[in-house]
Image (spheres, grey):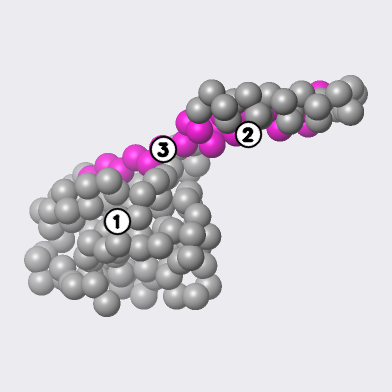
Amino acid sequence: MVAVAAVMALVYGIALQFMPKGWPAGIALIGAPFVLLLMYALGKLVTDSLYVRLFPLPLRRIDWDAIESYYVRTYRPIREYGGWGIKQRDRGSGIAYNAQGNRGVRQILCSCQRVLIGSQQPESLEAAIADFVPQDQAATEA
């Protein structure tokens, strides 16, 4: 981590020398990596919906009635979604909310949209979802 910070300071320090009047761009160059380092996923289960947020980005609400099926799966974040974060691909993978790792709970909504919520404990997340969504909607990985 210290090595990454040192390289960033060196690179951004050199970049700032060439833009003395561009201080807003310099602040953006220095601030963006720190925002990415602070990014984390937050999920909240309440009686009417599942809320997913990848801090500092906006909140997503998924109603329990909208979930057609769900299951735990291991995925390939870079190949399937292009990395971590809030990602969406046209290849049928749907949208992913993931901060780290390669495991999560895939939900298929009634609108045929696929939503993957990354989790370090996907079995616990699946069990929590099962408390709100009927068990017959639990599916196996397709």
Q: Residues within 10 Å of mark 3 (few under 14, many from 20)?
A: some
Q: Is residue 17 above or below residue 138?
A: above
Q: Quadrant of residue 28?
A: top right
Chain-order first, disc 3 or disc 2? 2
Q: Is residue 80 visible?
A: yes
Give coordinates of residue 104: x percent, y percent: 29, 56
Q: Please name the amino acid that badge 2 sits on.
A: Ala
Residue projecting furthest to the front: 3
Q: Please name the amino acid that badge 3 sits on.
A: Tyr
Residue 13 located left or right of residue 79: right
Residue 32, label in figure: 2
Is residue 32 inside the magenta stretch? yes
> Who is closer to the viewer here, 35 or 13?
13
Give the residue number, with chain letter if any, for mark 1: 104
Q: Is residue 62 above or below residue 54?
A: below
Chain-order first, disc 1 or disc 2? 2
Chain-order first, disc 1 or disc 3? 3
Task: Measure the alpha-carbon separation of dots 3 and 2.
Answer: 15 Å
Residue 19 located left or right of residue 9: right
Q: Residues within 10 Å of mark 2 (few under 14, many from 20)?
A: few
Give coordinates of residue 46: x percent, y percent: 21, 44
Give coordinates of residue 72: x percent, y percent: 23, 62
Mark 1 touching mark 3, by CB under 8 A?
A: no
What's the magenta region?
23-45
> Who is closer to the viewer here, 43 or 140?
140
Give the residue number, with chain letter if any, for mark 3: 40
